[in-house]
Image (spheres, rainbow, N blue to C red):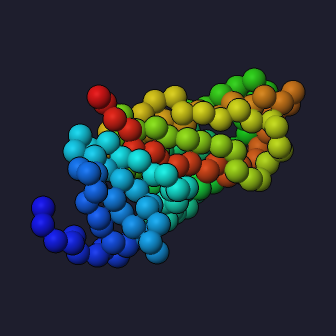
Amino acid sequence: MAGPIPPTAYGQWRLTDGTLQTLVAGTVAATADTSGNQDFPAAAKLSDGGTVTQATSKSTTVVLNTHTGQITLHAAALAAGVEVTFTVTNSTVGAADVVVLNHGSAGTAGSYLVGISAVASGSFKATVSNASGGSLSEAIVLNFAVIGGSAT
């Protein structure tokens, strides 16, 4: 390829030794090689976050089509030792992606275990467990991030 690659909204592109580099303010922010492997040497920050609130129960499906976000759960009671799973419909999720989930705020700290129980193209399932000794009726907030994966 001859000549410079046109700048984008995120920065400038540069082709070096078969690797395409994205430059932001003169610093390499990301690279992609000829096999499609991507590397983010600096901290990657996704900026298309959003929020959604469950409507009727802790098992109600929510829809949020962003790479990062916050899900406010319904305040329905969750008995001690019980877990509930709900679906997050999200068009940014691929079958080989990694979804990270944590208890972000609200509710009793340390009383919930949260995790991802399934990932599919277009959705993921989140599971919330009550690890306390009693029933909890709290509208906790979960944070999530979708990280692009590879099936190779």
> What's the residue at 39%, 67% (across, down)?
23
> What's the residue at 25%, 60% (across, down)?
15
* Horizontal and vertical percent position of residue 64: 45, 56
Relative to 120, does residue 75 appear above or below in the rendering?
Answer: below
Residue 89 in sight from this viewpoint: no
* Horizontal and vertical percent position of residue 43: 55, 55
> What's the residue at 37%, 73% (across, down)?
11
Question: Residue lying farthest right?
Answer: 133
> What's the residue at 40%, 56% (across, down)?
30
Which of the pair 56/63 is nearer the observer? 63
Residue 104 in sight from this viewpoint: yes
Question: Residue lying farthest front?
Answer: 17
Question: Residue lying farthest left?
Answer: 2
* Horizontal and vertical percent position of residue 111: 81, 36
Relative to 28, does residue 152 appear above or below in the rendering?
Answer: above
Which of the pair 15/47 is nearer the observer? 15
Which of the pair 144/71 is nearer the observer? 144
Quarter of the rendering containing residue 108: top right
Picture quarter with the C terminus: top left
Picture quarter with the N terminus: bottom left
Whether residue 41 sits left or right of residue 113 in the image: it is: left
Which of the pair 127/25 is nearer the observer? 25
Count how many numbered circles sit on residues in the image. 0
* Horizontal and vertical percent position of residue 71: 59, 53
